[in-house]
Amino acid sequence: MLVRYQHWVNPQAYEITRAYTIPLNVGLFVFGCWWQLLLSTEAVSAKNNLQLFALCICNGCLFAVNAMRYEQTSDTATEMLTGADAGVGAEPLVDSSYSYWPVVKPALITSTAWVGVFLVLMKLGVYFFIAFLVLYGVINVHYAMPEFGIVMALIPAALLQISLAVWCVRKEIYVGMAFVIILFCAASAYLFSRIAAMFGSGARAQTLLKDEMVLFAMVAFCFVFATLCTAIKCTINFKHGLKPIFERQEGLQKLQDEDSYRLDVILRTNGSTDMLKSKRFTLD
């Protein structure tokens, strides 16, 4: 009974959902800034105006998430301070004179173009999808098996899906793209179901960081659905772009190179002008 009382008075940090709000908010925001920095550097070097425009939209979404973070941080600090002051005759565990919560200020289309749009949407959507999975799994599900394991398994699955999608769209593989489209449909359905669950009246609707989860889920759903549409368009455009023309030109050039090689072999082997003329007349 004494052990149970001690656990009730002083629970472990990982058993309290509120303890994850500040690290997850700060970690996801920092990761989002680094991800935007990487994609911005790539877009500027490649002069990709579409990706820069999409990054501006993502920056606005991250700013909205950061604005929501201040209220959550304030509530968490208040509740943790109340829990520390609840001790009878105990010294405060938190030094209120030190600022533990510093303010962080956020600082007509061709087939090739459709592929570029597809890659841009996919690169930006993966951040919001993974950020939602992390928040939803740790805060809302909170280690409840088997759903927590399924949610965490979706993160490497999403990365593998992106690798498969890039390879299939560049190689123009119909079967692979069909599988990728099915995966995007499944991701859209999953996000829609989680949004519906958080707006419902069940246990998943009563959670911390609900506003951030809903924002991440909605933005991820928009990106995934747009990526799904562009993936279908890219699949329709397979074998209709410049790639078949280049392949035919490469085949013709290879044939010409083989003819030149054979002619050089005849010259070196015979070494006779009369024989060369007869061979040339025969070819003509």
Image: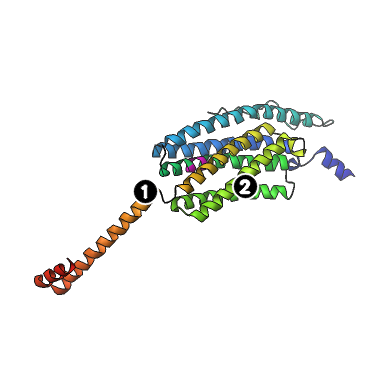
Seen in the image, is 215 located left or right of residue 236?
right
At which x and y percent is residue 217?
Answer: 63, 37
Q: Residue at x 47, y 32 (%)?
A: 53
Marks 1/2: CA–CA distance? 32 Å
**Which numbered disc, 1 or 2, marks the residue closer to the eye?**
1
The kind of residue on which mark 2 rests is Ala
Query: 212 or 49, which is in the foreground?
Result: 49
Judging from the image, what secondary structure is the residue with disc 2 in? helix
Q: Residue furthest bottom?
A: 270
At which x and y percent is residue 30?
Answer: 57, 36
Which portion, as a residue range, is magenta?
118-122
Which mark is first along the chain, 2 or 1?
Answer: 2
Q: Quadrant of the N terminus?
A: top right
Q: Which residue is mark 1?
A: 242
At which x and y percent is residue 102?
Answer: 62, 28
Mark 2 neighbour class, 10 Å CA radius: few under 14, some 14 to 19, many 20 or more: few
Query: 167 or 232, which is in the foreground?
Result: 232
The kind of residue on which mark 1 rests is Leu
Q: Which residue is mark 2?
A: 186
Q: Residue at x 42, y 51 (%)?
A: 239
Residue 121 located within the stretch drawn in magenta: yes
Residue 253 located within the stretch drawn in magenta: no
Seen in the image, is 48 located left or right of residue 96?
left
Q: Residue at x 65, y 40 (%)?
A: 192
Q: Are marks 1 and 2 in contact (CB under 8 Å)?
A: no
Predominant secondary structure, magenta span:
helix
Query: 95 or 131, which is in the foreground?
Result: 131
Q: Residue furthest right?
A: 1
